[in-house]
Amino acid sequence: MKHLPTCYGIIPARYGSTRFPGKPLAEILGKPMFWHVFEQARQCPELKQVVLATDDNRIFSAAKEMDVPVLMTRTDHPSGTDRVLEAAQILEIPKDSVVVNIQGDEPALEPMMLSELLEPFTSPETQVATLVRKVEIAKAENSDVVTVVFSKNGRALYFSRSVIPHPREGQNQFIYEHIGLYAFRMQTLKKFVALGPSRLEKIEKLEQLRLLENEIPIHIVVTRHRSFDVDRPDDIQRVSQILAEKPEK
């Protein structure tokens, strides 16, 4: 019988954001965004624990008031993944356990996506996993959308802000959009942060390329579920409508 390691979810919640300062505290249906992310994530049955990791007293205090488990982390982390590692080390997560980096700007996150993300870790060979879904070429041409190509056995080959594979002769039915949810074995998460930014990562501004450049395989999981992230204040109205239409659990 296949065995899934102990799994933990960590939600990095940084106050500073170029496009949307204070984003984790943005109000959605009367509650801060981080609360919605936490409520969705904790519905994943495979996660033993879900915590918020922040660098800001305002977010920390608001989380405490709402009974959301929260950890204070350093202010100088270059990425959310670095913040996730610090939180995982504070929690003393064992090296073979799995840590999920849950994006703090996905208040409409579908819990089943987390279950899908974790399933590959029943194999001891899986070190990192992430989600993708099919996307139309019109959407893929937006540089905010990251596309990915992967091998027949589900290993990532490359991620790009360009459309890959390039549809040289018209329509392409094999374009996949990357969804920014990652799961790492704890020992691989430590290695990832210790490696530091890589050459291609710096060019594309995509930290997952650090793994590929250092020959750490990424297991790709194709999902049918949609992801609705909040990048700018204008996105609040759209995601509020999505959440308002969700059936009560």
Image (cartoon, grey):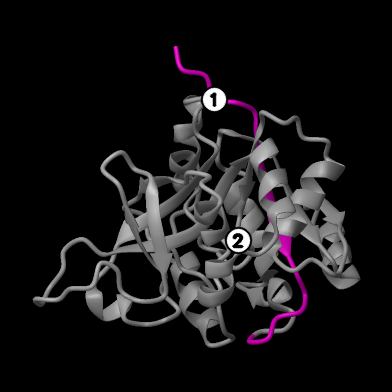
Residue positioned 57% across, 45% down in the render = 183
User: Circle 2 is placed at which residue position?
Assistant: 103
Image quarter in which the N terminus is found? top left
Which is more N-terminal, label 2 or label 1?
Answer: 1
Q: Is residue 227 above or below residue 234?
A: above
Q: Nearer the viewer, residue 82 or 134?
A: 82
At 38% from the left edge and 61% from the top edge, which residue is drawn? 226
Q: Residue furthest left?
A: 169
x%, y% of residue 72?
88, 58
Q: Residues within 10 Å of mark 1 (few under 14, many from 20)?
A: some
Amino acid under label 2?
Answer: Gln
**Front residue of this view, candidates 132 and 57:** 132
CA separation in Å, label 1 and label 2: 22 Å
Disc 2 secondary structure class: loop
Is residue 179 left or right of 150 when viewed as pictured?
right
Residue under label 1: 4
Report crowding for label 2: few under 14, some 14 to 19, many 20 or more residues within 10 A (C-alpha).
many
The reply to whether the C-beta atoms of the residues labelled 1 and 2 are less than 8 Å apart is: no
Q: Is residue 3 magenta?
A: yes
Q: Residue at x 30, y 38 (%)?
A: 153
Name the residue type under label 1.
Leu
> Would residue 76 be counted in the magenta stretch?
no
Residue extending farthest to the top is 1
Magenta residues (range): 1-19
12 to the left or right of 72 = left
